[in-house]
Image (tube, rainbow, N blue to C red):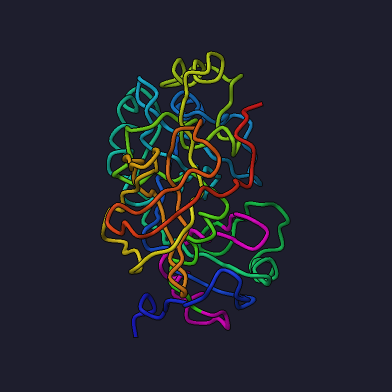
Amino acid sequence: MNWKTTFAPLSVNASDTLPELMLTHLDSWGAITMVGADKKNYLQGQVTCNVVTLTAEQSIFGAHCDAKGKVWSVFRLFHHRDGYAMFQPKSAIEAELRELKKYAIFSKVEIAESPDIALGVIGKQAQAYIDRLSDAQGDVRAIDGGTAVRISEQRWLLLVNEQTAEQLATNTDATRVDAALWTRFDIEDAIPVIERADQNEHIPQAVNVQAVDGISFTKGCYTGQETVARAKYRGINKRAMYIVSGNVTTPLSDSDAHEMERSVGENWRSAGRLMAHYTFADNTAIGLIVLPNNLEQGTELRLTAQPSTRWTIQPLPYSLDDE
């Protein structure tokens, strides 16, 4: 049996108790790797985060923008083997790789899409599981076959070669779940995500990159810095990414775009597209969406394709201030 087919959906409600140890194959996620003598300086001049201060035991968020400050990619950056890995949705990698390589000819650096496989470890026993793979204590640890990265108290990412991935997936007592559950926790943690459909649409602050410490306002120049700085010091950004929740008449599919509308008096106006979503067993759902940051509290939303639904904005797990 192909180990990649052994991960099954886990039908749960928001309040249900989850298995204490779960493993998932993050088949829609990947990484760009960067190696070479100039990797640190080259990346420092391209992205919003401070690459120079990143230690081998840390991971940080960052964004890569075009010259106008629009985001090509939001990624989690960490040391991986002999270089860096920029973990992000696979759908964003083709365009991001092209843009990231534009000026690489002038530097001693090799930039490529990683062949490694991403696994997610989830649950109360996730930390103990990782401790069995490595004696290290940091949030980023070298393990056999790749790297383990702490995402939150109960989530770790494993970026490993295929042989190691197969070994871990076939020799485990963990409950094998599909990647939808990982998306649920990304939504609940309001982790910025840019898929292909959202590339070149938003500035970093519109998807809360500053709120997850993904922007350094004291580092040197990088592509798009002028716009990012103006958004902070002149208040030009009028949008933010929010968690929304509500009911669905049919579960939300991954293959379709899900547009939303917001109430304006007795009318409805286009609000945008869900960037990520998760449907619970009781036909309630949660998602991430970029909205105007001055909406009145209690503004109602609905799915355009399911007009009888009603959704509301939920509290974020962090402040949107960039101080």
Task: Give the camera-side residue of 282 and 29.
Answer: 282
**Residue in the picture at 27% in, 56% down:** 305
Q: Position of residue 300 (x, y in %)?
A: 45, 47
Q: Position of residue 20 (x, y in %)?
A: 64, 76
**Residue in the picture at 55% in, 40% down:** 297
Q: Position of residue 209 (x, y in %)?
A: 52, 35
Residue 164 sits inside the magenta stretch:
yes
Instruction: Answer left or right for 98 relative to 243.
Output: left
**Residue in the picture at 46% in, 75% down:** 281
Task: Give the camera-side residue of 141 and 207.
Answer: 207
**Residue in the picture at 68% in, 59% down:** 153
Tell which residue pokes out farthest to the bottom in this image: 1
Task: Give the camera-side residue of 257 and 130.
Answer: 257
Instruction: Answer left or right for 135 relative to 185.
Output: right
Q: Is residue 86 above or below residue 248?
A: above
Q: Position of residue 180 (x, y in %)?
A: 43, 66
Using the rendered view, name the quadrant where residue 49 is placed. top right
Q: Which range of residues does the magenta coloring cover?
A: 148-175
Tell which residue pokes out farthest to the front in this image: 266
Callout count:
0
Q: Is residue 217 above or below residue 244?
A: above
Residue 47 sits inside the magenta stretch:
no
Using the rendered view, name the quadrant where residue 178 is placed. bottom left
Locate the C terminus and report the quarter of the image it occupies: top right
Locate the N terminus and report the quarter of the image it occupies: bottom left
